[in-house]
Every structure is written in C-alpha cells, then in structure tokens.
Amino acid sequence: MMLKYLLEKEFKQMLRNRFMSKLLIALPLMTIVVFPYVTNQEVNDVKLSIVDLDHSPASSRLTQKAASTDYFRLTDVSPTYPDALKRIEAGDVDLVLEIPPDFEHDLQNEGTASVRIAANSVNGTQGSLGAQYLASLVNDYSREWREENGAASLAMPEVPTFDTHVRYRFNPMLDYKVFMVPGLIVVLLTLLGGALTALNIVGEKEAGTIEQINVSPIPKHLFILSKLIPNWIIGLIALTFGMTFGWAVHGIVPEGSLGLIFFFSMIYIWAVTGAGMVISNYSDTMQQAMFVLFFFLIMLLLTSGLFTPVDSMPLWMQRLTILNPIRYQAEVMRLIYLKGSSFGELLPYFFWLCGFAVVFNTWAVMSYRKSL
Amino acid sequence: MGNAIEVAHLSKAYRRQVQALDDLSFSVETGELYGLIGPDGAGKTTLFRILTTLMLADKGEARVAGFDVVQDYRRIRNLIGYMPGKFSLYPDLTVEENLDFFASVFHTTVKANYHLIADIYQQIEPFKHRLAGKLSGGMKQKLALSCALIHKPEVLFLDEPTTGVDPVSRKEFWDMLLRLKQEGITILVSTPYMDEATRCDRIALIQGGKFLGVDTPQRLVEHYPEKLWAVRSEHMHRLLADLRAYPYIQTSFSFGETYHVTMHTQGSPDDLQAYLSQRGHRAARIEAILPSVEDCFMWLSRQLSHE
C-alpha cells in the first residue's frame, strides 16, 4: 500500500534527524519545567522604602509589620519623601510608604490617620498589586490597633464590620503553576504539531523533492496524510512528555480524566497540523513559512487567554478570540486539569475544535495543488 | 504508436510579460533521443514542466505517450521519468532507500527493472548505504537517473542532466543514454553544452521560447550556409577587435583558442592574412574548418535577431 511506503520514508527521515529528536525532549522540558517559573506573575519581594516622620511606637509597629511579610523587602528608610522618590528613580525602591508626623496622635484622638503610598508603575502589575497589598496591610493594622485600644476610642460609634473570607475554588493556594502548566502544554502542542508540519512540507519544496512526488502517480490525499500522521504522533508524544514533566517537577496532575485530555488534544493536534499545512501551501521557502508562523503564533498566543485573561481584553478583541483555536484548547486543558470537567460540560469546546479541524484540513487539501 | 511527444502551438508567459514559450510546435518519434540545445532562459525548463504535467500552458496542446498533458495527466505520470536540473532526491535517505522509495511509489520493485539501471547503478552500488546528500555531483546524477528509470518509463525527460558534472562522468552519462535508447525509451534531453548535441538523433536549437532549427546534428552542420574559418594569432586579445574592423567580415565569435569567422564574398583568407599582418599579427593562421553545432546555433540566433 502506497501510504505505508510514504510513512516509512517519513519516519526514516524523522528518526535520522538528530535535531528533531532533541527538540522533542528539549521543548517540553523548557516549556513545562522552566516556563512556569518564568511566567510567574505573583508579586513577591517588592522593594519598600519607609519614610517615618512620626517616630512613634505606632509608626514603628507599622514599619515592622510591613517588613515582616514576604511581599515586601525593606530596602530603604529615607528621612523625607523627596529622598525616597530619588531612590525610586535610582531603581532601589519600588514602593514608598510615608507615615505623616501626627500619625499616632490622629490615630488615638480621631481613630483614623492617613498614610501616603507611592508606587513605581513602570512595571504595571508589580506597581498596582504592590500598592494594593500595602493598602490592605495598613487597613489590617488600623483594625488591630483599634481593637487593642478599644477602650481609648469608645467615643467612636460602633461601626458594623464585615468579615470577609475568600475561598479560592479549584486552586486553593492560588498557585500560579497549577494554572500555567495546562496552558503551556497547549503551547507545546501548537509548536510541535503546527510549526513542524508547516516546515516539513516547505522543506520538500525547497529541496525540490516535491517535484519528484508530483510527477509520480501518488494521489495527493495520501501524500498529505503521510505528512500529517507523523506530526499527530509527535504531538501526542509531546503531550505525554509535557504531562509527565508537569507531574514530576511541579506535582501537577489532572483532576479530570486522562482519556479526555488525550481525546481533546487529538482533535486539537488535528486542527493545528491542518493549519500548518495551509501555511506551508502558501509559502515557497522555509524563511517565508517561519515568518508567517511567527506572526500567527504570537498573535494567537497573546490573545488566547494563556497569559492574560480574555475577559480583561477590549470587547472587540474578546469577540475576535472566538476564532482563536488556542483559546479553546487552553480552556479545555485548564477545565480538565483544575476542575475535572466531564465531556458533557466540554461539549461546546468539542464542537468548536472539530470545526477548526475540519475547516483547516479541508483548506489544506484544497490549497495543496498537485498540478497548477 | 507514432510520436512519443507531440507539441502544437504551445505558449507560456510568466508575469511581467516574459514569454517563456512562443508558439512552439514539434514532435519526437518513439524511441528517439531528442536534444534541446539552448542557453539559460531559453524556455527549456518551462517546456519540461509542461510536458511532465507540473505546469499548465497558456495556449496550445501537448501529448506525451499519446495522452493529453491536461486531461490524462494521471496516465502520463505513470509513463514518464523526470530528472529535473536541480538534484531533487531525499538527501537524508541513503542511495538504496531513495531507489526503493521511488520504485515503490510507482508500484514496482528495484529487482523488476534492475536490468535497466544495472550499468549506472553498479557504479554507485558500493555507496548504497551512504546518504544521497553526501554523494559527489556525478554520483548524484547517476542516482537521480536510476530513480527516474526504476519504473521503466516510456518517455524520459532529462533537464540539463550533465550541468555541473565532470567531463568523464558526462561522457559516461551519454553512453548510458544511448543504451537506454536501445531499450526503446524515448528521451528528451536538454543541455547547454553544444558538444553533447552530436550524440542526439535530432536536435532542436531553442532560444527565446522559439526553435531556431530542428534537424539531425549532421544535417544541421551540413546546411551551414557559409564558409567557416578559424583564425588565431600571437595577439589573441587584439585579434578580435582587428577582425571586426576588417571590412569584409560577416561574423566572428570566440571559440576556445580560436576565432570562428565568416566573410562576405569580397573577402578571402589571403586578403585577411595580408590585412592582419599589416595590423602587426605576424603569425596569424587562417584555416578552413567544418562548422560545429555551436556555430550553427550562433549563426541561426544571429539570423533571428536580424529579422
């Protein structure tokens, strides 16, 4: 059978390609083991400067409280606010807490006192999150203070207070890695499934071997199939590696069924290999294919919700992400991994992914013209 | 059976108005070794790509082995062997694997048609476990020819098979083609080397997408209409300018170590000799020679540009 010979040839070439086999290990290793640390968006170790103009027991207790959390590292104590700002400019400090001269006095007599918080927002996430942490820390402090000195501030009317307890479902520790690893597995599938398919066929174009195939009686669907099947297998191997690394290094195991993950991944790989074929059909050289790939990969990855939530994008972009296959698979993986969703709950995703797969593969077959 | 290749009024233009083929008509008899001789950009590769069903012509018709290149392209693909100018086998497969692969995609085996390729393949067989990409130029050509032949094609298309191949391998390659011809395989071969043309049954001189002339190499040479002289002297650099300044000169072209010239009726070798010695060429030698295919090509292409 023709397909057997074609596949035999593909696998021979693949196994002989030393670079490929290294890539198959190195890429999952990098994406799954190293990336979760790199793409960490938790705010830790914010460099804090305190300008204490009060020099009272109350102010030094606040200073101690701020310095004793993991979020902040007290790197500077400046005599005045302008001095602290200079330290921000020098990059020694991210966040400034200024305690005004009458801090303790106001706290005792009026029950409230204000402090100033200034954040360096060059790194927006760090600035805003750092400022928020600091603000809540100050609030916390004032509550403690009131409780302890309750007797002294009896004059204050009883303010009803809410005690809020937040429970994070499905990721109780809000561990960033639990959230990222399933998403990064999707990146892996996209790179190894889609990109390699695109480059493989363009490679034959560049080598001129596609001419030899075209003058032979090989039917075009068999030739395409012989290019896709090895990449499906590569994709599944990558998935296995990715999940194994996720478990071995980060201890992350899916909540839901393993079979379901493989099932959805197969549909997804089917879709991205089809997309890779389409790109290769419109490119004449590896270089061209690389640039087209690069363009689409960056666009699609950044809008997939992998790194920033889709809900925080502008509305028009949110609508556009309906056409982003990476988004669906990323959500599927997170739902199965974190929430343990069942097939019934994922039905809409199933239809969308099947839709992408059918469209891309049909397009691929149509655009692959055997005779011009 | 008739003609293996029939081409009628074939035209093909690329974007920006490059006329690659210009109303071309010719036919190749079954079992013939037919040479296409012409410079780069003459339209040879375009013609090959249309005949091997890789490209569609703008106008005209072509039939290969009795089948239309557009309607019956599937039938044709089973019947032809094509060796493009650029080496296009899998460089990451071994010699043997390449051959096996191309045999199997044509539903045959290396064993079944081994006799066809035996002569060439035996020369590369010692290296059969070597990757095709690591072969030398001449060996690559032999492997490519083996792969194009392994399914016993009726018509063989060879696009500049000897370009970039050393003279010894070139000669061997042509010996090989003559043996294939005896097997009854029709061969259409293109080459920029005029000296190879004499080994074809018939040759077509092609330039600018048109045939300048078609004939057997022998008759083409016999029909050369002028008397041809080879001129040489001790000052070869100056000689060309001096020759062109000679009033009765018709054509003069550089051919290796001599200049080939034709003269108007008023000129004669003696007169030319006298003229040249006047110009300081003391040891100038003028000999009558028989024209080569290249002379014919130069003469015909000059006629075309004068029209």
Image: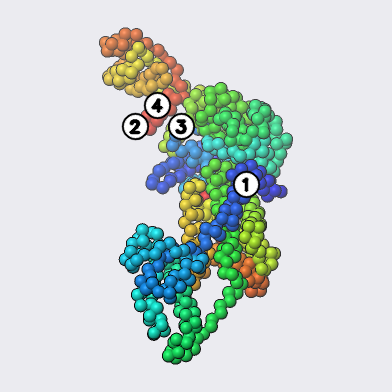
Can you say whether A175 is above or below B77 in the image?
below
Quarter residue A242 falls in: bottom right
Q: Residues within 10 Å of mark 2 (few under 14, many from 20)?
A: few
Residue A17: give x, y in percent of width and height.
61, 43
Q: Identify the secondary structure beneath mark 2.
A: helix
Residues marked 1 and 2 touching at CB (< 8 Å): no
Same chain for mark 1 and mark 4? The answer is no
The mark nearer the N terminus, 4 or 3, is 3
Which label belongs to residue B306? 2
Residue linked to disc 3: B38
Amino acid type of the residue tagged 4 in the rendering: Trp
Sequence-first disc among 4 and 2: 4
Under mark 3, the amino acid is: Gly
> Which residue carries the number 4 mark?
B299
Q: Which of labels 2 and 3 is toward the front?
A: 3
Determine the chain carrying the residue at label 4. Answer: B
* Kind of residue indicated by mark 2: His
In primary-sequence order, the first of circles 2 and 3 is 3
| SS at mark 3 in the image | loop
State yes or no: discs 4 and 2 in contact (Cβ < 8 Å): no
Badge 4 marks a residue whose secondary structure is helix
**Colouring of the image:** rainbow
Disc ID at residue A21: 1
Q: Quadrant of residue A210?
A: top right
Picture layout, residue A56 above or below residue B119? below
Image x and y of residue A168, in percent: 58, 74
Question: Which chain is disc 2 placed on?
Answer: B
